[in-house]
Amino acid sequence: MTVLHHHLDGATLLRYASGDLDEAFSVVVATHLAMCSECRRAARAGEEVGGRFLEVGDKAELSAGSFDRLMQRIDDDGAGQFADSAEARHGADGSSDVPAPLRRFVGPSLKDIPWTRVAPGVRKHAINISSATSSSLYMLNIAPGRAAPEHGHGGAEIAVVLSGAYRDELGRFGPGDVADLDEHIEHQPKVEQGAACICIVATEAPTRFKGFFSRLLQPIVGI
Amino acid sequence: MRSAAHLKQPANEFELSVRRCQHAALLGRIAKVGDRSAFEELFVFFGPRLKGMMMKGGADVHAAEDLTQEVMLTIWRKAALYAPAKGSVSTWVFTIARNLRIDRLRKQSPYAYEDIEALKLESAEIDGENAVMGNQTAEHVAQALKQLPATQRKIVELAFIHDMPQSRIAEKLELPLGTVKSRMRLAYGKLRLNLEELQ
Ligand SMILES: [Zn+2]
C-alpha cells in the first residue's frame, strides 16, 4: 500500500459523513476514501457523530399502526430479507487502475478514457452527472512539465491524483493524494517530468474558474 | 407494542452503552432467524427518533413517516450486513437514513450515494478495525461531542440532524462561510484527538 501524504480536510470529512456534499464532490471524496484507510476511519468516526445525535435526538410520535403497516409491507414483499448481493458491486479488482467509485462512471481502464484536447498539454473528459447541482465533475490528463500560474483558490475545488504526480509548495501529490485546499492557500503546481498526471476533479461553480485544475481550462472558455 | 420504558431518554452513558450492545444482539436475531419481536424492539427505539430526525431535516409529517418506514425496511432487509466492527448500530441506522435522504434528493440521478460500506468491502482487511474498537469509537465520539464548545457543536448538529448545507448554516447563524468551515474543522480535530487515544 502506497503511503499517502495529502488527505481530506476535516470539514470535508464531516460534510461527507453528514451527507452535505453534492454528487460531484462526494465522488471525488469517495475516490480518495477508496485509496486511503486512514481517511476511511476518519469518515467512519464522522458518521458516528450522526449515530450519536440519532440516539439522543428528539423523537416524533409515529402514526397509529405504523409498525403493523411495515410488517404488512414486509409480508407482501414475500418477507424479502436478504443481504443484497449488488452490495458487493465494488468487489476487489486488482487489475483495474481506476478506483472503484469511479469505475461506474468511466469504466475499468485509464487508457480507454475518451479524452478531448482542451488546451496545450491539457486533455479533459467531462463526466455527466444528472442530479441537480451546480458542480461539475471531470478528469484531466495534464502533460509532463505543465505548470499553472501562481494563484490562490477562489472557489471550492477538490482533486485526487490517479496517475503521475505534480509538485507545489505543499509537496508532491502522487496517486491517491487529494488536493482539498483552503481557498486562501497560494500555490504554483507543476506536473512532474516523465509522465502525464491524471486527476479526477470536482469544481463548485463552473463559471468561476479559480482553482489550479479549472484554471488549466481557462484558455478555451476565454476567461 | 413494548412498554413505555423503552421510550425513555437514556439516563446515562452506561445505559446507552448497554443499549448499544442490545441493539447489536437484536440485529443479529433479525439477520439469523427473521425475529420479528427483535425488529419491533428496534422499531420502538429508532422509529420515533428517525421520524424526529427527518422532520428536523425539513420533511413534513407524511414524508418523515414515509422515510422512517423506508429506513426500517432497509434495516430488516440488510440486517445481515451489519458488523459491530463498523461502529454502533445507531451509526449504521444513521447512514441508512442519510443515504435514503440523499437519494430522494437525487431522484434524477441513476447513481446511489457512494457509501463507505461499499468501499470497505474492497479493502476491509487493511482497516485494522475490530468489534471492540467499533464500540469504543461510539463512546469516544460521544465524549468528544460533549466537550465541544457550544458554537462548534451547534454547527455539527445543524449539519447532521437538520441536514443543512454549509451555506445555509452560515446564513442561519449569520456567520461568514469561512467561519463555519473553520469551526467544523476544529470540531473534527477534537473528535480526532479523542479517537487517537484509542490507538
Ligand atoms: Zn486520506
Image (cartoon, rainbow, N blue to C red):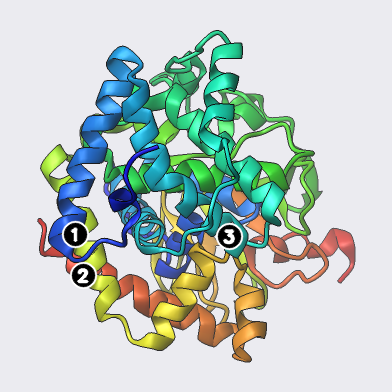
Residue A19 is left or right of residue A167, and the answer is: right
Question: In front: A3, or A121?
Answer: A3
Q: Indicate the chain on which mark 2 is placed.
A: B
Q: Are marks 1 and 3 in contact (CB under 8 Å)?
A: no
What amino acid is found at the position of numbered circle 3 in the picture? Asp
Q: Indicate the chain on which mark 3 is placed.
A: A
What amino acid is found at the position of numbered circle 1 in the picture? Glu
Identify the mark at residue A20; answer none if there is no mark.
3
Q: Residues within 10 Å of mark 3 (few under 14, many from 20)?
A: many
- Residue B69 visible to an observer of this rendering: yes
Question: In front: B47, or B153?
Answer: B47
Residue A54 position (above or below residue B127): below
Residue A99 is left or right of residue A39, and the answer is: right
Q: Are marks 1 and 2 in contact (CB under 8 Å)?
A: yes
Q: Indicate the chain on which mark 1 is placed.
A: B
Please provide percent x and percent y for residue A161. 50, 48
Q: Look at mark 1 in the image and give the residue it sits on.
A: B139
Q: Residues within 10 Å of mark 1 (few under 14, many from 20)?
A: many
Q: Residue furthest top?
A: A78
The residue drawn where x is 86% and y is 58% is: A220
Residue A122 is left or right of residue B88, and the answer is: right
Question: In front: A76, or A128?
Answer: A76
Please provide percent x and percent y for residue A75. 55, 13
- SS for tag 3? loop
- SS for tag 1? helix
Distance from label 1 to label 2 (Cα)?
6 Å
The residue drawn where x is 36% and y is 48% is: B91
Q: Nearer the viewer, mark 1 or mark 3?
A: 1
Identify the mark at residue B143; answer none if there is no mark.
2
Distance from label 3 to label 2 (Cα)?
24 Å
Q: Is disc 2's CB within 8 Å of ligand 1? A: no
Q: Residue furthest right?
A: A222
